[in-house]
Image (cartoon, grey):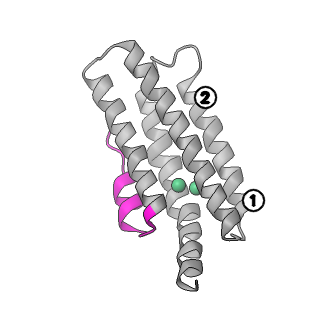
Amino acid sequence: MEVNLKSIAISSFGCSEIDREHEVFLDILNRIDYVYTHDLDHEIRRDLMVELYKFLDFHFQSEENLMRIFDFPYSDEHKLDHERLRHLLADIIGVSNMDMVDLSELKDFVNIWITEHISSLDGKLIQHLMKMKSEE
Ligand SMILES: [Fe+2]
Ligand SMILES: [Fe+2]
């Protein structure tokens, strides 16, 4: 699927919790790519899409909890973007045809929206977290 997520998520930051979750997200995408490329059965495709959505949802919640714990000043803007991305992914995955997702749409979602979110909004959050941790 050729996603650019890895270099952005791993090289730019150095906040272990968030970087690790971004890596897991990338692993799930790579598994999806494998399953589609090898034309594996529909049940696996559907279950991977469920995993992808649930993981993204978990990851967003995890960042939002960190924002509250560490008093992040831009949390409203960040949470709104999470909500937008949840809806976008839900639209791409669909409900009844979760095993027939258009991979080019998923690829665009990751390469455009997710990488943009990570490099801008997550970057700001991570800077804040690193600063708070260095002052502990
Ligand atoms: Fe985020
Ligand atoms: Fe993130």
Image spot of residue 42 (x, y percent)? 39, 13
Q: What type is the residue that disc 1 sits on?
A: Asp
Whether residue 52 appears in this view of the structure is yes
Kindly identify which residue carries mark 1: 76
In the picture, measured across the screen, residue 69 lies left or right of residue 99, that is: right
Disc ID at residue 21:
none
Q: What type is the residue that disc 2 sits on?
A: Asp
Of residues 18 and 108, the one nearer the viewer is 18
Whether residue 102 appears in this view of the structure is no
User: Which residue is outermost to the front?
Assistant: 136
| 12 inside magenta stretch | yes
* Mark 1 element type: helix
Q: Which quadrant of the figure has residue 63?
A: bottom right
Q: Quadrant of the C terminus?
A: bottom right
Residue 109 sits above or below residue 74 on the image: above
Image spot of residue 38 (x, y percent)? 24, 21
The structure residue drawn at horizontal position 32% and vertical position 42%, both measured from the top left corner, is 2
Q: Quadrant of the N terminus?
A: top left
* Mark 2 element type: helix
Kindly identify which residue carries mark 2: 91
User: Which residue is outermost to the bottom?
Assistant: 135
Bounds of the magenta segment: 1-16
The structure residue drawn at horizontal position 47% and vertical position 60%, both measured from the top left corner, is 17
| 128 inside magenta stretch | no
Image spot of residue 114 (x, y percent)? 51, 49
The structure residue drawn at horizontal position 35% and vertical position 42%, both measured from the top left corner, is 27
User: Which residue is outermost to the right?
Assistant: 76
Neighbourhood count class around disc 2 (C-alpha, 10 Å): few under 14, some 14–19, many 20 upward: few
In the picture, measured across the screen, residue 19 lies left or right of residue 64, that is: left
Of residues 47 and 98, the one nearer the viewer is 47
Residue 32 sits above or below residue 58 on the image: above
Disc 1/disc 2 C-alpha distance (Å): 23 Å
